[in-house]
Image: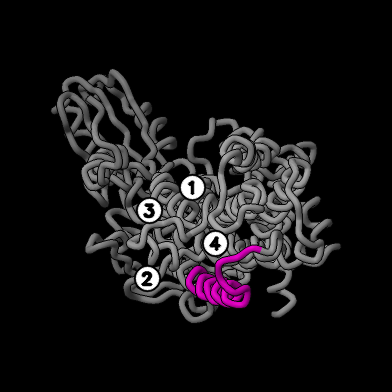
Amino acid sequence: MLAIETKNLTKEFNGLIAVNNISFEVQEGEIFGLLGPNGAGKTTTIKMLATLLNPTKGEAKVWGFDILKQRDEVRSSIGIVFQEPALDNRLTGYENLDFHARLYGLDKETRKKRIEEVLNLVELKDKANVLVINYSGGMQRRLEIARGLMHYPKVLFLDEPTLGLDPQTRHRIWDYILQLNQKEKITIILTTHYMEEADYLCRRVGIIDFGKIVALNTPQNLKNILGGDVITIEAFPPKRAFEILQKLPWVKKIKEHDNFIDLTVDRGENKIPLLMEIDQKEAGFEIKSINLRKPTLEDVFLHFTGKTIRETETSQIEKNKRLRPAHHPPIR
Amino acid sequence: MKSNNLQTIYVMWLREMKRFLRAKSRVIGTLAMPFFFLIAFGFGMGRGFSFPGMPQMNYLNFLVPGIIGMTMLFNSMFAGISVLWDREFGFLKEILVAPVKRFAIVLGRIAGGITTALIQGILILIISILMGFKILNPFGIILAIIFMILIGVGFISFGIAIASMIEDTQGFSLIMQFIIFPIFLLSGAFFPVTNFPGWLRPIVLIDPLTYGVDGLRASLIGFSQFPLILDLTILLIFGLLMVALGSWLFNKTEI
């Protein structure tokens, strides 16, 4: 069964296109990631799927329900953890969960049982009766994940689930996400601009830039598009080394730059011993250094958009700054 | 479905109660202003203030229903406008994404706001009685509570309507100065509306709180400038209109 199905989903804000003709499908039980820089349209996509924004054009189904015509059914089927906190910090953790459970119509016994379950899952049981205002950022995020699960959603949306968290907390949250997917069999759609997050968690990743999905596949296949690992060799004399190395049957691509030679190969770690087997005296060149680099999603992003995610981010932030109307006159 | 709506109303009300009972500074803060008004005007200005044709009218007795109306106005508007704070702190998203009717959310907010405003209005009434305010007849209190509820429903919904239209909390001080204060000052809370010059009278007459304060006076001290039934009818119409407007605008809210 398809958990999500979108067709030409488009959202414009005052003539600015935030999401541009996006079409994709997510299978039941999958962890699916939308990877892209800030301002690429990830959050807008999620908000449309969660019925918080109406699309300008196109259509989408969540768990088989139309996001425009069957809003209540969509809302009952999903859980969502927003990018910015959405807790009532004047209530305790327990009360936030209880509020949610009542809003979703859980009966008294289910409420009690489920609150206990989700609090255990995110290890917040001992903090249940503390006001949320006294929680740390990581605890708030965990509470939000717990709340997103309260009503046994079929599909869970996580919008930048680890934004602004320290590395330790980030890894803990990753573990929760994997656990949810495996134990509770929840389909998870997450957005992120962290490459390693998408790589670690997602079965499939859609790379999104300027409101468009530019590539969609498993992280491994996306990386494979780049052709394989890159071994960079520093050799002397480079001309001679190039002649010999290009004849090796397992070299898929060879490129010389400066005094370095780049070899594109499969499973680079197995190829380094083969390089060492070359009789350098007989071949007439000397290898000074070898460096193996596995392609990352960063390289994939670069390949499809012609820039790194960080460059994109700065230019997007600049653009947003210029677009944002000034609320305050400058102080002189 | 119907029980689900009741549950939504209840949970919105419950949340408001919990927040209210915890925010001691808020309770004291909102009670302080009407209390100071009572002291300053009731005692300070009361001496030497006389009503033409009503020599027996004591200014404190005249003032208390106005101050109760003011307490209801401020607390109700704040309760309605608190949608803005929910938006600011993100909690509105949690409410809007839930599979419940938006109308039920609005009703829940009204229920919560009425309860907290009513508690404060009644506290002010008790303080006033301790200060020497004389109630004409104990049954009048029940009628007064009905007026307080009507004022509450109207202005909470009005607050929700405004909060659904503006984007951020920065608009709040504008609302305070250009909406809440004029409504309060022109309602005749401090002096009879007949004291306003003729050119201001139309504004005084479209101010719904004018009828709220007048109705409260009628119930508590037996003095009013309009017929009781007119006060009731106008407040009822105002309340219904505002509930409809507030629900409609809140229903259109996108995040």
Q: Are marks 1 and 2 on the same chain?
A: no
Residue positioned 57% across, 76% down in the render: B230
Q: Are marks 2 and 4 on the same chain?
A: no
Main secondary structure along the magenta-highlighted residues: helix
Q: Which residues are magenta?
A: B223-247
- Label 2 to label 4: alpha-carbon separation: 33 Å
Q: Is residue B180 visible?
A: yes
Please rate how many residues cluster around mark 3, counting C-alpha atoms within 10 Å: few if below 14, some from 14 to 19, many from 20: many
Q: What residue would you read off at disc 3?
A: A222
Q: Are marks 2 and 3 in contact (CB under 8 Å)?
A: no
Query: Residue A15, position in %: x, y?
Result: 22, 63
Q: What residue would you read off at disc 4?
A: B155
Protein chain holding label 2: A
Q: Are marks 3 and 1 in contact (CB under 8 Å)?
A: no
Q: Amino acid at mark 3?
A: Leu
Protein chain holding label 3: A
Q: Amino acid at mark 2?
A: Pro
Give me the disc on residue B88: 1
Foreground disc of the pair 2, 3 = 2
Q: What residue would you read off at disc 2?
A: A55
Foreground disc of the pair 2, 4 = 4
Viewer-proximal residue, A258 or A180? A180
Q: Is residue B239 magenta?
A: yes
